[in-house]
Image (cartoon, rainbow, N blue to C red):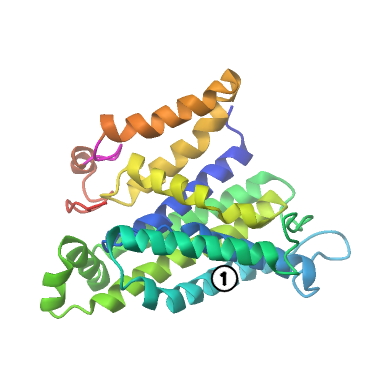
Amino acid sequence: MIDNGLLVQMLLGALLGLSVYLPLAAGQLSLATPAFYAVGGTLAALLSTRWSVLGATAAGGFPVLSLLLELVLGGALAGTLALLVGRLVLRLRGIYLAIATIALVEIVRVAILNLPFTGGAIGIFSIPQPFTDASGYLLTALILLVLTGWICQRLDTMPLGRAMAAIRDDELAAGCMGIDTTRVKLTAFVLSAVVAGTSGALAAHFLNTWNARQGSFDVSITTLAFVILGGSRAWLGPVVGGLLLTALPELLRPVGDVRLVLFGLVIVLGPVLAPRGLVSPELLERLGRWGSPTREQKP
């Protein structure tokens, strides 16, 4: 049964799917989402437990305004890291870029694991919660998802979005037309980091605990599966993929350990049965302009 807690996880999964989608919209296969997710969550955990200004009140509560500030700071720190690292890694393309971003994920994970103030392997516990139940997190995550989806939709009509599409189709031709390909790719990379960092800050409070395992290589593969299963042609694809693949393990829990096998089969057979994703071009044509333009992205 789907409860509010699972719905929050599903919405967070959809946000991470969009984080992978944004660089892909500019033709960049980046798997760095878990690194930025971990940075945002770690910052929120530290601010709320180690700094009295943003920490729990004497009554044991946590101000909602402090949560909003942490969401902004988590996204800003992740975006700053992406701005610094992106200038180097975005010189690479294809599988080489994917490997470089996987290395970034591991670097961040090991750093969080070994820093003296992050709790090591145990992590940070008793992160104060601003909401008494999951409904508050559900509303916050839904607002973030709607806002991110709206931004992705608006990109289609903006010069930045058209430049991203041109680079995705042919980067050399886009450069010859006068598009600053480096700036456009870096912008998409930073936007991806901001989405992941903000999601991590919210997830830290929702989970009530945070450690280095939240930003592991496994998360890179899972978030990439969101895009592959849902479809990379429109922003609706990663949202659908993130919602379904996050909910599926819990929905299959009654079958016991077999659920892991079934979950793997879905990931394997999904691209075979739906090569263009669940949000296919044909479906997008029926939905009109709500999902995306009729341009096709290359994974």
Question: Quick one: SS at disc 1?
Answer: helix
Residue carrying label 1: 72
Quarter of the N terminus within the rendering: top right
Indicate the position of residue 21 as horizontal and vertical percent values: 35, 55
Marker count (numbered): 1
Which image quarter: residue 19? bottom left
What residue sits 50% from the left and 31% below the top? Answer: 248
Indicate the position of residue 20 as horizontal and vertical percent values: 39, 56
Indicate the position of residue 123 as horizontal and vertical percent values: 73, 57
Q: Residue furthest right?
A: 58
Which image quarter: residue 188? bottom left
In the rendered view, would you say 159 is above or below 265?
Answer: below
The amino acid type found where label 1 is placed reads Val
Judge by depth and name the residue closer to the eye, 206 or 153.
206
Q: Horizontal placement of 100 versus 205: left or right?
A: left
Q: Residue furthest top?
A: 255
Can I make out residue 195 in this image? no
Judge whether residue 160 is colored magenta: no
Judge by depth and name the residue closer to the eye, 55 or 224.
224
What residue sits 74% from the left and 65% below the top? Answer: 63
Can I make out residue 98 in this image? yes
What's the magenta bit mostly, secondary-structure-wise? loop
Which image quarter: residue 189? bottom left
Judge whether residue 278 is colored magenta: yes
Numbered range of the magenta stretch: 275-280
What residue sits 35% from the left and 39% below the top? Answer: 229
Judge by depth and name the residue closer to the eye, 218 or 143.
218
Indicate the position of residue 39 as horizontal and vertical percent values: 58, 65
In the rendered view, would you say 51 is above or below 37?
Answer: below
What residue sits 60% from the left and 21% below the top? Answer: 256
Estimate how packed mark 1 is, as few (under 14), some (14 to 19) or many (20 or more) residues with alpha carbons within 10 Å.
Answer: some
